[in-house]
């Protein structure tokens, strides 16, 4: 994480701490910020799904308009089956929670990045404004608009 990330996190409330993912809430701006950890390299499919379910459950507890996800340390690969499961079971929770926008700072690992983008090309995810960035500052500028 950059110094700007650390500074911003200090102003936010941590709402989820999992082995491979931390999530913070900027309540004033109604934005979640999620950070995948480097340990995600070891994550199994069932653990990934459990992490996404825990994250998606936050949307019934907190009203947000969007979220930012830092995937620079993310190394998991979403199979076609998990992408479909994500669209069927997770995306509706985002939508019901009020999400309109999602900003990703992308991992440089080609296959994991590609599978994230494919997951948001699924039918239900099409209603969300999803953008993919190389730079943290650009992603945050867009999501916080």
Image (cartoon, rainbow, N blue to C red):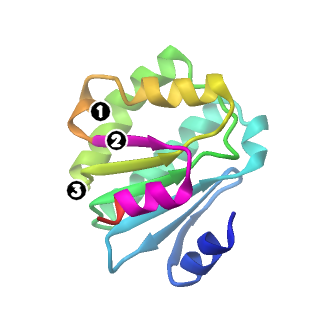
Q: Image height check: is 81 above or below 77? A: above
Q: Which residue is mark 1?
A: 125
Q: Residues within 10 Å of mark 2 (few under 14, many from 20)?
A: some
Q: Which residue is mark 2?
A: 130
Q: Going by the picture, which residue comes out furthest to the top? A: 80
Residue shown at 26% from the left, 41% from the top:
128
How far is disc 2 from disc 1 in space, using C-alphas? 9 Å
How far is disc 3 from disc 1 in space, using C-alphas? 13 Å
Q: Going by the picture, which residue comes out furthest to the bottom? A: 11
Location of the C terminus (image quadrant) = bottom left
Residue shown at 32% from the left, 74% from the top:
29
Drawn side of residue 12 relative to residue 2, left or right? left
Q: Position of residue 43 (x, y in %)?
A: 72, 36
Residue 14 painted magenta: no
Mark closer to the observer (2, 1)? 2
Label 3 sits on a secondary structure element that is loop
Q: Residues within 10 Å of mark 1 (few under 14, many from 20)?
A: some
- Considering only order in the chain, which callout, 2 or 3, is on the residue closer to the N terminus? 3
Residue interval drawn in magenta: 129-142
Drawn side of residue 41 relative to residue 130, left or right? right
Label 2 sits on a secondary structure element that is strand
Q: Position of residue 67 (x, y in %)?
A: 40, 56
- Considering only order in the chain, which callout, 1 or 3, is on the residue closer to the N terminus? 3
Q: Which mark is residue 98?
A: 3
Q: Which mark is residue 141?
A: none
Residue shown at 67% from the left, 41% from the top:
74
Evaluate if marks 2 and 1 touch, with contact meaning CB atoms under 8 Å apart. yes
Q: Position of residue 138 (x, y in %)?
A: 46, 56
- Considering only order in the chain, which callout, 1 or 2, is on the residue closer to the N terminus? 1
């Amino acid at each position: 994480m950059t110094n700007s990330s650390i500074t911003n996190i200090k102003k936010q409330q941590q709402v989820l701490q999992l082995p491979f993912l931390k999530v913070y809430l900027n309540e004033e701006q109604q934005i979640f910020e999620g950070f995948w950890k480097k340990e995600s390299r070891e994550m199994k499919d069932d653990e990934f799904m459990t992490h996404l379910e825990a994250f998606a459950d936050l949307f019934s507890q907190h009203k947000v308009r969007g979220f930012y996800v830092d995937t620079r340390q993310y190394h998991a690969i979403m199979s076609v089956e998990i992408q479909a499961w994500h669209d069927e079971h997770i995306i509706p929770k985002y939508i019901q929670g009020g999400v309109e926008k999602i900003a990703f700072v992308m991992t440089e690992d080609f296959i994991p990045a590609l599978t994230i983008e494919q997951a948001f090309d699924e039918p239900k995810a099409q209603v969300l404004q999803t953008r993919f960035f190389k730079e943290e500052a650009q992603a945050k500028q867009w999501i916080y608009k």
